[in-house]
Image: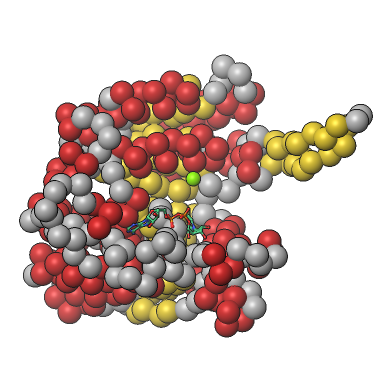
C-alpha cells in the first residue's frame, strides 16, 4: 500500500496552534510506529482569503478531493466579519463539506475520568461516558427548497424546508449501522415522526436499512425526548443517528456533558473512494477562538483527538487511535490542564505546546 496522504488546513486563530501540536503527533507515529504519512499543508478560511481573495482556492479543493484525509483547524475571526457573505471564511469550510459530499458527521461525546467533575452534570451520570452522534450533514432544513424571506399579503414570511430523500436517509443510516458494528451494536434513531412527514420517512428508511444489520439493536425516539434522555442518563445510548437540524442541537448538548469545547473532535465522512477509504474531513468542534488566539492558551486536545478519529476511520488503525486517546487520558490523569480545563484552585495551566509535549511524552 502506498503511504497514506493527509492534507492539513490549519486555518485561522487557534487553528494553526492546535494543528502545530497535531503535527508533532503525526511525526511521532511516523518515527515510532512506522506509520509515515505523506503530509501537505494549505490555506483555508481567512488565511486563504488574505492570500488569494477566496476562502478556499480551487487548487486546495482539488487536493482535498485527492488525499486520504483532510485535517482542518478552524476558520474565521473578527478581521473577516465584514466581508461579503460569498467570501467569508466559513464558506471555505462549507465548500469542502459540500464538494466532498460529507454526509455523515460523527461527533463523539466521551468523558475522560479525570474531567468527570468538570461536567455540569453529576460524576455518576458522565463518568465513563462514550457515545457517538451521527448527524446527517448535507441535506435537511439547512438546504431544502423553497427557502427565503418573501412578501405575503402585507407582511414578510420566512421559509425553510425540511426535505429528505430516501437515499439521503439510507446512506447516513448505513454509516451509523457500520459504526455500531464496530462499537456496541446499538443505534437509537431520533426524529419527530409524530409531527413531521420527513420524520415518518426517516423512521421507515432507517428501519429498512436495519434489516441488513440484524445484530444491531435499533430503537427510535422523538428528538425532543432524546434531548431530555441525553441530559438525564446519557449512558443509555451508544450510537445516536439523527438529521441535520436535530443533530446540530443534540451534538451541542452532548458536547456539554463532557466539559470544554477544547476537548471535542469530529469527523465528517462521505462515500468510499476507489481505495475503499471514505472521503473524510477531521476537525475540532470549536472555532478559531479569537479571544485567546496567539497566546499559547488553546487546548490542542480537540485537534489531537480528531487525528485519532482519522487513524480509526480513514486508516483502519483503531489500536493506534486508542493508543493516542490513552495518552491524552494519561496526561489529564497526571493533572495537566490548559486554561479552559481549570476549575480547581491552585492548579497552574499549561500552554498549548506544553500540553502537546506532554501527549508526546505519554505516547513514548
Ligand atoms: P469558538 O469555538 O471559537 O470559541 C468559543 C469559546 O470557547 C471561546 O471563549 C474560546 O476561547 C473557547 N475555546 C474554543 N476552543 C478552545 C480551545 N481549543 N481551547 C481553549 N478554549 C477554547 O466559537 P466562537 O467564539 O463562537 O467563534 C469564533 C470564530 O470561530 C468565529 O469567527 C466563528 O465564525 C468561527 N467558528 C468556526 C468554526 C469552525 O471553523 N468549524 C466553528 C465555530 C465557530
Ligand atoms: Mg452547532
Q: Work out whether 133 lies above or below 277.
A: above
| Residue 70 position by quadrant | bottom left
Q: Please count the marks in the image.
A: 0
Q: Quadrant of ligand 1?
A: bottom left
Residue at x 41%, y 27% (from the top left corner): 227
* Frontmost residue, 318 versus 44: 44
Quadrant where the N terminus is found in the figure: bottom left
- Asked whether the viewer can see residue 156, the reply is yes
Q: Position of residue 240 (x, y in %)?
A: 39, 34
Residue furthest top as drawn: 194
Q: Position of residue 181 (x, y in %)?
A: 31, 40
Left or right? Give the position of 113 relative to 277. Answer: left
Residue furthest front as drawn: 346
Describe the colour scheme in one phrase: secondary structure
| Residue 41 position by quadrant | bottom left
Q: Work out whether 44 lies above or below 171.
A: below
Residue furthest bottom as drawn: 51
* Frontmost residue, 301 versus 280: 301
| Residue 109 position by quadrant | top left
Quadrant where the C terminus is found in the figure: bottom left
Q: Position of residue 110 (x, y in %)?
A: 26, 43
- Asked whether the viewer can see residue 112, the reply is no
* Frontmost residue, 135 versus 20: 20
Residue at x 8%, y 56% (from the top left corner): 334
Residue at x 48%, y 26% (from the top left corner): 223
Left or right? Give the position of 261 relative to 158. Answer: left
Q: Position of residue 184 (x, y in %)?
A: 25, 35
Residue at x 27%, y 35% (from the top left corner): 120
Amino acid at each position: 500500500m502506498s503511504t497514506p496522504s493527509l492534507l492539513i488546513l490549519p486555518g485561522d486563530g487557534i487553528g494553526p496552534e492546535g494543528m502545530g501540536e497535531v503535527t508533532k503527533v503525526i511525526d511521532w507515529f511516523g518515527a515510532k510506529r512506522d506509520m509515515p504519512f505523506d503530509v501537505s499543508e494549505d490555506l483555508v478560511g481567512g488565511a486563504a482569503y488574505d492570500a488569494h481573495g477566496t476562502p478556499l482556492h480551487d487548487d486546495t479543493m482539488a487536493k482535498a478531493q485527492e488525499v486520504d484525509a483532510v485535517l482542518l483547524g478552524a476558520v474565521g475571526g473578527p478581521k473577516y466579519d465584514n466581508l461579503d457573505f460569498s467570501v467569508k471564511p466559513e464558506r471555505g469550510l462549507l465548500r469542502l463539506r459540500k464538494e466532498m459530499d460529507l454526509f455523515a458527521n460523527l461527533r463523539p461525546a466521551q468523558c475522560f475520568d479525570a474531567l468527570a467533575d468538570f461536567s455540569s452534570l453529576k460524576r455518576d451520570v458522565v463518568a465513563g461516558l462514550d457515545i457517538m452522534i451521527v448527524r446527517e450533514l448535507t441535506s435537511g432544513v439547512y438546504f431544502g427548497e423553497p427557502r427565503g424571506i418573501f412578501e405575503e399579503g402585507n407582511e414578510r414570511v420566512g421559509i425553510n424546508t425540511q426535505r429528505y430523500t430516501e437515499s439521503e436517509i439510507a446512506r447516513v443510516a448505513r454509516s451509523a449501522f457500520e459504526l455500531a458494528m464496530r462499537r456496541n451494536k446499538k443505534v437509537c434513531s431520533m426524529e419527530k415522526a409524530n409531527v413531521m412527514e420527513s420524520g415518518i420517512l426517516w423512521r421507515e428508511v432507517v428501519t429498512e436499512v436495519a434489516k441488513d444489520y440484524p445484530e444491531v439493536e435499533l430503537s427510535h425516539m422523538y428528538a425532543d425526548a432524546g434531548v431530555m434522555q441525553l441530559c438525564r442518563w446519557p449512558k443509555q445510548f451508544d450510537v445516536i443517528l439523527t438529521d441535520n437540524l436535530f443533530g446540530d442541537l443534540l451534538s451541542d448538548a452532548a458536547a456539554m456533558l463532557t466539559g470544554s469545547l477544547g476537548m471535542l473532535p469530529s469527523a465528517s465522512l462521505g462515500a468510499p473512494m476507489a481505495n475503499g477509504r471514505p472521503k473524510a474531513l477531521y476537525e475540532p468542534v470549536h472555532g478559531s477562538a479569537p479571544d485567546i488566539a496567539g497566546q499559547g492558551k488553546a487546548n490542542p486536545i480537540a485537534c489531537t483527538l480528531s487525528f485519532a478519529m482519522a487513524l480509526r476511520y480513514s486508516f483502519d488503525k483503531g489500536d493506534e487511535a486508542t493508543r493516542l486517546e490513552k495518552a491524552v487520558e494519561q496526561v489529564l490523569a497526571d493533572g495537566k490542564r490548559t486554561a479552559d480545563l481549570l476549575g480547581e484552585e491552585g492548579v497552574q495551566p499549561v500552554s498549548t505546546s506544553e500540553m502537546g509535549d506532554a501527549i508526546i511524552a505519554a505516547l513514548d
